[in-house]
Amino acid sequence: MEKLMSALVFLLLFSFINETESRKDPPPICSSSCGDSLEIRYPFRLPNDPFTCGDPGFELRCENNRTIMNFHGGLYYVKGISYDDHTIQLVDVNFSDDGKCSLPNRSLSTDEILMEDRYPGLVNFTYSYTLNYVRCSDSSVGSVNNSMVPCLTRNSSHVYVNVTNWSSLTSYDVPKTCKVIAMAPAFYEESVPVNPSYETVLKMQQSGFQMVWSVECRDCRAKGRGCVYKSADTTSLFECEKEYDYNAELRYIYTVVAAMFLAAIIGFVRFILLPLVVFSFILHKYLSTNKDYREKSSDIQQPLTPERYNYTDILSMSNNFKDKIGEGCFGTVYKGQLHDDYSVVVKKLESFKVSEEHFINGVSRISGIQHPNLVPILGFCSEGSKHVLVNQYMPNGSLDKFVGNSDSFSWEKVWEIVLETGQGI
């Protein structure tokens, strides 16, 4: 039993696939006619054709050896089908006889044609027109009074045909005493005057109209996708509009955002962060160097204003001049000590003859000179003929002991000392 059911399912699937494939690609020998020498083949078909022939959405009818199409509820004779250009020419069944005065079998506007999935457009809009049948209660109706339809006009009712391009009349074009009762498309390659006669209208009715047919366009719109021309060189071949790839669009957006974010980071690092780091490094280096220089020279930097001592302080500081460490041109040099155990040099100026005012001015000038190679003046004493200078104690002795000795410094070092001393002065 299971084998039998499996076989039946397989046969149904096989027949369904064959039917689907046959509709997509019908055999070339599958064609028929209605007796009017019009070849009917894929995608068109007649009701009695095999189910593998044609497409059900393009089914035609055969009546009295004439091919008829039911289009939007109206009946139209098929005057021609082009399988190369994908076009079909139709004529309203009420307009087929020469000189027949009538309204169309069914009112049809150009907009209805353009909205059709199977027939997505007219062949040529340049030669496409719309016949607007207007009924008016007044004979003086202005612009719509183009050509009167004699068989439909009565004493109290006048019917006219107003010819426009492929678009229809608007409510602003129709007088209040008139009403559009029917419309019919027409394809007419001869020139149409502004106010055509009813004879011209009859010719336009009998010419019918031409549409483009497309199975692909019908299938595309059935899938919810748009229908576009296959190439710019043709207006009869269509294909499905490419599906919008949301994932690809999101990936593109993410890529752009990531690239912009990365560029912003690179720009921030290169033009903001890196200059700040370099500037901070240079500033730190400068401050560190300047700090080291200040710390190095702090030990020999003298105060701006030397302290004035009395002679009693000098005696106490030098322990009554007991520790003699040298002698100069203007006096003797003794080692002393301040109250905070800070070693100093007390220079007693014995042969220095100058007034107290001049001495104090000289001390003030010398104390204003600050340089690493100059011994700062810490204080002084001036009482009568007693003049004393208090300097910082230099454990290695005075510089003159080394400058005079050729074995101590090179001439380049001596020259450097001289220059720096001059700069300090």
Image (cartoon, rainbow, N blue to C red):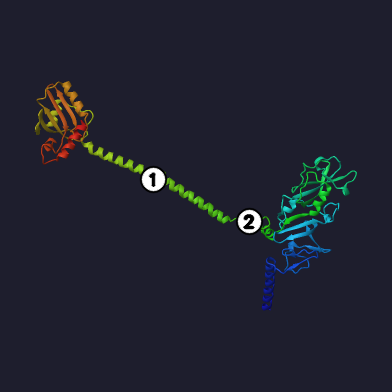
User: Distance between the Cα atoms at labels 2 and 1?
Assistant: 55 Å
Residue displayed at 67% across by 78% down = 3
Q: Residue at x 18, y 25 (%)?
A: 362
The correct choice, above or below, for 238 with respect to 303 in the image is below
Question: Where's the C terminus, which quadrant?
Answer: top left
Q: Mark 2 or 1 closer to N-term?
A: 2
Res 391 quadrant in image: top left
Q: Residue at x 20, y 29 (%)?
A: 367
Which residue is labeled 2 in the image?
231
**Image coordinates for residue 114, horizontal then vertical, percent:** 72, 53
Visible in this render: residue 73? no
Depicted 120 relative to depicted 346: above or below:
below
* Element type where label 1 sits in the image: helix
Q: Which mark is residue 292?
A: none
Q: Is residue 185 above or below residue 332?
A: below
Q: Which mark is residue 274?
A: 1
Task: Residue type at mark 2: give it.
Answer: Ser
